Image (cartoon, rainbow, N blue to C red):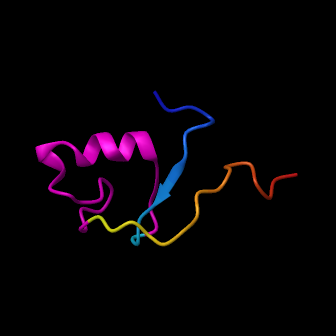
Amino acid sequence: MPGDDCPLIWGECSHIFHMHCLLKWLGTAASKQQCPMDRRPWVTAERKVTDVNSGCG
């Protein structure tokens, strides 16, 4: 189950998901290896995983 310590993953489509959630989605036949938001083919963006709180406060 994702939580505050779950890493984030960005798609080239600019959508961001908990890695756990996205991997679960991509593992289903219904996903067709597409972004769950816009149905474009899923391509992981070249980004480093960051803390969701970085840059805050």
Q: In which quarter of the image is the N terminus?
A: top left
Is 6 placed left or right of 14 in the picture?
right
Q: Where is residue 4 in the image (x, y as percent from the top left)?
A: 63, 35
- Residue under the image location 22 percent in, 44 percent down: 27
Position above or below: 29 against 42: above
**Residue 29 within the segment the image draws in magenta:** yes
* Number of marks in the rendered image: 0
Classify residue 31 as left or right of residue 15: left
Q: In the rendered image of this protein, does residue 26 appear above or below residue 39?
A: above
> Does residue 48 sit above or below 19 in this rendering?
below
Q: Where is residue 57 in the image (x, y as percent from the top left)?
A: 88, 51
Seen as rendered, the residue at the extreme top is 1
Nearest the camera: 36 or 9?
9
Q: Residue shown at 25%/68% (left/top)?
A: 40
Report the side of 40 relative to 30 (left or right).
Answer: right
Q: Which residue is at the far left?
A: 29
Place of residue 14 in the rendered image (x, y in percent of width and height, measured from the top left): 46, 68
Q: In which quarter of the image is residue 43?
A: bottom left
Image point 19% across, 50% down: which residue? 31
Quadrant for residue 44, please give it. bottom left
**Residue 35: percent from left, percent from top:** 30, 59
Range drawn in magenta: 14-41
For this view, does 12 lie left or right of residue 28?
right
